[in-house]
Structures are given as C-alpha cells and as structure tokens.
Image (tube, grey):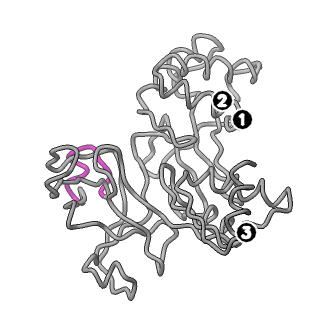
Amino acid sequence: MPVAEWLVKVLKTGATPLVQTLAGSALRLCLGAAQKQMDLSGTRFLLGGEPITAARVATIQNHGCVPIPRYGSIECGAIGYGCPHGEFPDEVHLLRHMHALITAKSQGETLGLPPEALFVTALHKCSPFLMLNLSMGDQAEVQQRECDCVWHELGLTTTLHNIRSFEKLTGGGVTFLGTEVIQILEQVLPGEFGGSPTDYQLVEEESALGEPALVLGIHPSVGPVDEQRVAEVFLGRLSTSSAAARVMVQMWRDSGTLKVRRRPPIISRAGKILHLHVSRPSSGRQ
C-alpha cells in the first residue's frame, strides 16, 4: 500500500511513474490498489525476475497500467527489453551489441537439453563475466521479424519470447536450482509420509488473473496424510538449503503461494515425470 499511495501522488502531479519490479509483485500491487479503489492508470512497470505471461500482462493492462518486459540475469545484465508492439506478452528485443545468442536446436537431445535452450556469449567489453556459449538453464523461442518500434530502428531485429527456465524454479523473484527440491521430493517426504519417489511433484501454475501458485502434488495412493504437515515439512527442509531459499520460503508463507493437492503426477509429452512441472494454460505450452 505505501507503494500504491506513492504512485497515486506521482500520477496526480502529471508525471509518469516507472517501477522496476517482479511480474507477480506488479500484479498483486494492481489487485491490491483496486480493492482500495486506488487508480494507478498510467503507471509503467518494467518487469523481470519471473515468467511474464499473457494472464499477468492482461491483468496489469486491465488496471490501466503498462507492463514492459525485461529479460536478463545477474551474470549477463540486461539481455533484452520489451517490444512496445510485441506479438507475445514477454517478447523482447535482443541487445545483440552486448550478447550473441544461439539455441540448442537439433543438438539439444544429444546435450540433454530442450531444442529452445539458450546459449549466450558476452560481446561487450564491460560485461560482468567472460561467457562463451553459456547455458543459464533458460529457454526461449528466437526469431527475426520486422517491427516499427525504436529497438528495430536501432538495428535490434532479433526477438525472444516464451522465455522460461527448464532447470530452475522462480517464486517471488527468487530462483533456486531444481536439485535443491529433488532430495525433499524423492527422499524426505516419502520417508516421512510414505509413498515412492514419484508420488510427490511440485507444479508451478497460474490463476486466470495471472497470480502465481505452487502446488505440491501428492499421489492419492499414498493414503491419508496431514496436508498441512506435508507443506510444513517441505518448506522447513527447503529453507535450510540456502539463504535464498529461506527468503523464498518466507515469501511463500506470507503470500500463501504453496498449495497441497491430492493428484497423480503430471506426465510430460515425452513421458517423463518431472520434479518441477510448469503448467500455464495461457501460454499454450508446458
């Protein structure tokens, strides 16, 4: 609410506020302000840190605000900025004067990576790290297309969209490796509550408004369990894995992000039961 109140004050002066934040945080800010009948129309959000989906973009726009995607990382800095005429909700123009980018394509299967896996090479002399075909665990669809925006006029004709991580999970803007949850899902929870290593699965979902949710799925065959206790054991063990995980767990507790559901694990199109499954109907992909 303090942020929303500040935005209203800035808007009343005739200025246009720009807030750099997480996609989920911008969405919650819009929903919270609407509940208080506060008008944030005209506010611009520079979004990153989490997947920018059609549902999240639509909800922010429905509240009169302008979402601007940004793709980057601590290792690379900014990789791309949002196209104002983008065909996709998270479409960004690659800063190709700073980074060279290729995808795994047909070699992905040999490398154990999806064909859309990204490999980045640092080109700029001031890049924070020396990188040569580095995979950061991200994937995206890359294309060349004509556009009448200022980025295209500057020669930045390569765009990326449907940007996702295939080996990391992001919640509340904090990212951790999937390996940190594998032991909990395969050993800790079965040891505590019964079942096999494939009976527990973490699924990242999204509501119709774009609000993020994490579902801890438990196979019905496990039998009766205290679902709240399962959630507490999962969060408690995860919080001990790293400082970043402790921050994430606290964010999840505060926002009620983690839910427990009794259901069989989701099987991918390739027939795999993934520890971390991303399910967003609005993107048309999994």
Q: Which residues are magenta?
A: 105-115
Q: Is residue 107 left or right of residue 188?
A: left
Dot 1: element: strand
128 or 246: which is nearer to us? 128
Instruction: Report helix, strand or loop for mark 2.
Output: strand
Question: Which residue is at a point 20% across and 50% down the rendered structure image?
Answer: 127
Name the residue located 47 percent from the left edge and 19 percent from the top edge.
241
Q: Nearer the viewer, mark 1 or mark 3?
A: 3
x and y, in percent, of residue 237 in the image: 56, 16
Q: Which of labels 3 and 2 is toward the front?
A: 3
Q: Along the line of sight, which residue is nearer the eye, 7 or 141? A: 7
Q: Residue at x 48, y 65 (%)?
A: 90
Q: Which residue is mark 1?
A: 261
Q: Is residue 164 magenta?
A: no
* Foreground pick, 193 / 43: 43
Label 1 packing within 10 angstroms: few (<14), some (14-19), many (20+): few
